[in-house]
Amino acid sequence: MTMIAFGGVIGAGLFVGSGVVIRATGPAAIVSFLITGLLVVLVMRDVGASPSRRRQARGSPSSA
């Protein structure tokens, strides 16, 4: 139950914090969030694809 409470507090804080930023900066915050989200998606795709790009010459096939 404690972890659920922590998650709720953090989620609510992010939601309120985002609202404050959007109110202060206007549409620039939305553009910034979109650019950041795109960068996160690209990094995660690259991290997921990197093990398949560098195969090791030795070892079992399951470790590649």
Image (spheres, rainbow, N blue to C red):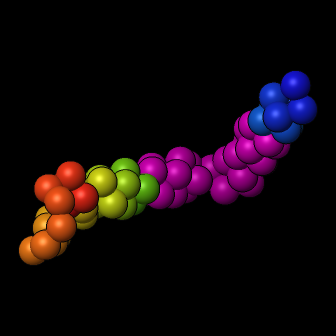
Q: Position of residue 7 (x, y in %)?
A: 78, 35
Q: Position of residue 58 (x, y in %)?
A: 13, 72
The count of marks equals 0
Question: Quarter holding the C terminus?
Answer: bottom left
Q: Is residue 21 above or below residue 6?
A: below
The residue at the far bottom in this view is: 57
Camera-nearest residue between 4 and 14 = 4
Camera-nearest residue between 23 and 43 = 43
* Residue 4 within the segment the image draws in magenta: no
Residue 60 is left or right of residue 36, and the answer is left
Camera-nearest residue between 39 and 31 = 39
Residue at figure coordinates x 33%, y 60% from the top left? 47
Question: What is the magenta segment's predominant secondary structure?
Answer: helix
Q: Is residue 12 visible?
A: no
* Residue 18 within the segment the image draws in magenta: yes
Magenta highlight range:
10-37
Residue 61 is left or right of residue 39, and the answer is left
Residue 24 is left or right of residue 59, and the answer is right
Q: Is residue 55 above or below residue 49?
A: below
Residue at figure coordinates x 72%, y 52% from the top left? 21
Q: Is residue 29 visible?
A: yes
Residue 55 is left or right of residue 49, and the answer is left
The residue at the far left in this view is: 57
Residue at figure coordinates x 21%, y 52% from the top left? 62
Q: Position of residue 11 (x, y in %)?
A: 75, 37
Residue at figure coordinates x 88%, y 25% from the top left? 1
- Among the 4 quarters of the image, the one containing residue 51: bottom left
Q: Position of residue 36 (x, y in %)?
A: 47, 57
